Amino acid sequence: MKIIATSIPELLIVEPDVFKDERGYFFELYNQKRYFDNNMQMQFVQDNESKSSKNVLRGLHFQKPPFSQGKLVRVIQGKVLDVAVDIRKGSPTYGHYQAVELDADSKRMFYIPEGFAHGFLTLEDDTIFSYKCTNYYNKESEGSILWSDKTIGIDWRIENPILSEKDKIAPLFKDFQSPFQY
């Protein structure tokens, strides 16, 4: 397993060791000891999965404390542009984002700890996206930021994605009151 640092130190790309032969492939998705040995000390309690057609954008979402979630995200089928935005007040990277392409072939994963808003854009039809969470889903704790907020300036590579009604009316970053402290 290879851990790759990003421009925001807490956001990590995980490249598992994939063993391929004529039968197919095998890789370890999660091994608590290996993750802990690499200073990624999170405990997962819930797994989620979504399937989307091309150009679906989901995000930017988070859960407020005490139900905040860290996530280990990956693509089972297809390809996404995955984005995390630092929403921790006082952080030197507050309001900055990291974008990573994830696809089924590479098996790369992206670790997003608590204190980050998360979203992704599907780049292929029938994309299956999966993620492990460090806390349970809690509807009352949901929060979001407008995907196209100019202050953050994410290059989504698309002008008119397919959005949920909730994501169309998410608040702007300037109107956002972060529940997270650095």
Image (spheres, helix red, strand yellow):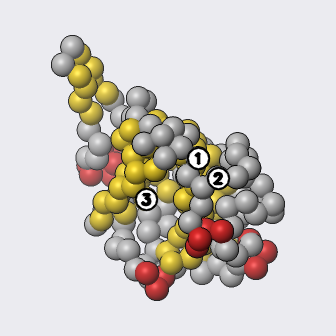
Identify the element where label 2 is drawn.
Answer: loop
Identify the element where label 1 is drawn.
Answer: loop
Task: Check contact, mark 1 vs mark 2: CB within 8 A.
Answer: yes
Identify the element where label 3 is drawn.
Answer: strand
Instruction: Give percent across and percent down for residue 119.
Output: 56, 57
What residue do we see at 49% from left, 47% from top? Answer: 53
Residue indicated by mark 2? 161
Against 100, residue 86 (above or below) is: below
Mark yes or no: residue 110 visible. Answer: no
Quarter of the picture holding the C terminus: bottom right
Q: How many marks?
A: 3
* Camera-side residue of 124 and 90: 124
What residue do we see at 66% from left, 68% from top? Answer: 168
Farthest top residue in view = 22
Q: Earlier in the sequence, mark 1 or mark 3?
A: 1
Farthest left residue in view = 23
Q: Earlier in the sequence, mark 2 or mark 3?
A: 3
Instruction: Give percent across and percent down for residue 132.
Output: 35, 57
Alpha-carbon distance for marks 1 and 3? Answer: 22 Å
